[in-house]
Image (cartoon, rainbow, N blue to C red):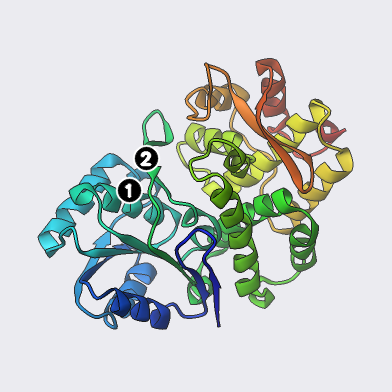
Amino acid sequence: MVIGNDTLGYPILVCENAEPSLRAFVRARGRRCVVLADAQPDVAARARALAARLPRCLGVLPIALGEPRKRLATVEAIADALLAAGADRATLAIGVGGGVANDTFGLAAALFMRGVTYAHVATSLLAMLDASIGGKVGVDTPAGKNLVGRFSDPVAVFADLQALRTLPFREIRAGLAEAVKHAILAGGESFDMLEMLAPHRFERWPWGEVVARSVAIKAAVVRADREERGIRATLNLGHTFAHAYESASGYRIAHGAAVALGLRAAGLLALRGGLFTREAHLRVLALLALLGMPLSTRVPADAALAAMRGDKKRRDGSLRFVLPDEIGLVHADVRVPDARVRSVLHAMEAPPGDAEH
């Protein structure tokens, strides 16, 4: 099974096994390639298996990643490894891994020798349906998440569905949080499908359809606004809160869990501003709960608010939010008084209950 999407002008292939499609793609380009791999054992093993079937491959470069290593120092180490492997400006760099790998390898490829072509093989659900789509690459600094980066499109993306079989639950959850976000943006059948699937074991999910639908939603938004000057900002639904929770927790809260918290917080903020209905908000919370997502946090409100002040989405010194009006309609660039934000952050320290009324 291969499901294709070329909305963005490059192939995005959802494959049960990415190897045949990747091999054909590399052969058609007729140039040398090098494989950058997240050094996690399962991912590195998959990268070596893929590389063994690729023509003119310079080898596999395993790189230790993880959110704490998503820094410029790692980008420099990748550049050194590429040079040592014999890569040059005509070499195709192929990254294998999840969202952190996409962000870090993609930025390294965009900077190495002022830019080499890059393709990504996504091995996590988060990377398949969100992180590898749209050309955002970047790394963190001590001051905040993704503060150093750029827009740099890959030449191809391959969602390697067989990798989902070995993913732990926390990694599935990380991707599903983004799938819920996309479903809130699109509404209709996209949200209905997740509600229908949520009570069932993940092994029974039609992952090709789930990933392809999310890819289509994100790709359509990105195509309309490549550099996030308008509608693309809606893809940040819940993320101002999520990035704050990640940062304030020292990244002990994983991205998927943080996005789930952010979706509840954005819903609360919209409710208190008169934008969202209680019924729609509870529908979102019910879906998140069925998927095993956290809905409250021990991160103190003041710590989260301090982290928000370093968010790159601030404009003129003011925080802006993406807030839902209904399932299927969200608004970006919404200014909210700090007092209301602080109130929501305090509410997030307790499970859903009175705060939702």
- Assess disc 1: are there few (<14), some (14-19) or many (≥20) residues with their C-alpha within 10 Å of its C-alpha: many
Residue at the (28%, 40%) spot, across then down: 72
Residue 66 horizontal side relative to residue 181, left or right: left
Pointer 1 residue: 107
Q: Which percent across, then down, holds residue 210? A: 65, 67
Can residue 122 be seen here? no
Local SS, label 1: helix
Local SS, label 2: strand
Residue at the (78%, 62%) spot, across then down: 189
- Rendered image quadrant of residue 273: top right
> Is the residue under label 2 in contact with that under label 1 (CB below 8 Å)?
yes
Residue type beneath disc 1: Leu
Residue 50 horizontal side relative to residue 82, left or right: right
Pointer 2 residue: 149
Q: Earlier in the sequence, mark 1 or mark 2?
A: 1
Quadrant in which the C terminus is drawn: top right
